[in-house]
Image (cartoon, helix red, strand yellow):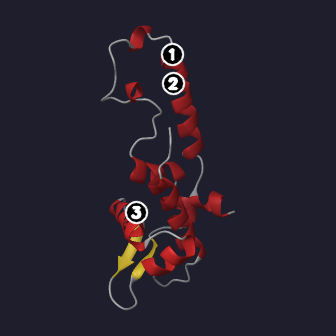
């Protein structure tokens, strides 16, 4: 499993919003500057986070973005899945990629164990954990 820049930047954006929140909306330009992410790429990531329901947005002169919930209510695995899709290390562990050899595959349990370890880790960390 390799997390792309979208996943890594999504975590940075969420942390930025949590740390810089004062009840007001934060513009993408402010986030872009602090995180050194191009505004165009940032807007793609924000769209994914917004679609997942993780952000409150407002338009206009005082518009921008802020977290929809408290940092301790965001699971890191959910944020990564919103930007990366599934985090499964190999396709045969997904329903779509399930192969006929799974029953007799000598490596299946190795990959399944790795998948379980990844999910256990990312699903037991919150945005608040990263902030601390």
Instruction: Give the mark nearest the N terminus, 2 or 3.
Output: 3
Q: Which mark is residue 111?
A: 2
Residue 51 spot, x, y in % from top left: 33, 62
Q: Is residue 87 visible?
A: yes
Residue lying at 46% horizontally and 40% vertically, measured from the top left: 87
Q: Which mark is residue 107?
A: 1
Residue 53 spot, x, y in % from top left: 37, 63
Rendered position, 84 above or below 92? below
Label 3 – label 1 distance at C-alpha: 35 Å
Rendered position, 80 above or below 117? below
Instruction: Give the mark nearest the N terminus, 3 or 1.
Output: 3
Q: Which mark is residue 45?
A: 3
Q: Residue furthest bottom?
A: 61
Q: Secondary structure at mark 2?
A: helix
Q: Secondary structure at mark 3?
A: helix
Label 2 – label 3 distance at C-alpha: 29 Å
Neighbour tally class for label 3: few under 14, some 14-19, many 20 plus, Cα within 10 Å? many
Cβ–Cβ under 8 Å for marks 2 and 3: no
How many numbered discs sit on the rendered protein? 3
Q: Quadrant of residue 39?
A: bottom left
Relative to 37, is 19 on the left or the right?
A: right
Q: Secondary structure at mark 1?
A: loop
Residue 102 spot, x, y in % from top left: 40, 14
Cβ–Cβ under 8 Å for marks 1 and 2: yes
Residue lying at 44% horizontally and 56% vertically, measured from the top left: 6
Residue 49 spot, x, y in % from top left: 40, 62
Relative to 110, is 104 on the left or the right?
A: left
Label 1 – label 2 distance at C-alpha: 6 Å
Q: Residue furthest top?
A: 104
């Amino acid at each position: 499993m390799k997390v792309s820049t979208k996943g890594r930047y999504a975590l940075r954006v969420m942390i930025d919003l949590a740390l810089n929140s004062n009840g007001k909306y934060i513009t993408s330009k402010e986030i872009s500057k602090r995180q050194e992410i191009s505004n165009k790429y940032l807007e793609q990531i924000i769209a994914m986070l917004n679609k997942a329901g993780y952000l409150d947005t407002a338009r206009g002169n005082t518009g921008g973005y802020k977290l929809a919930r408290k940092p301790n209510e965001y699971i890191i695995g959910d944020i990564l899945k919103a930007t990366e899709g599934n985090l499964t290390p190999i396709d045969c562990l997904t329903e779509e990629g399930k192969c006929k050899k799974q029953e007799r595959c000598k490596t299946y349990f190795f990959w399944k164990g790795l998948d379980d370890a990844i999910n256990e880790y990312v699903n037991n960390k919150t945005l608040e954990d990263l902030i601390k």
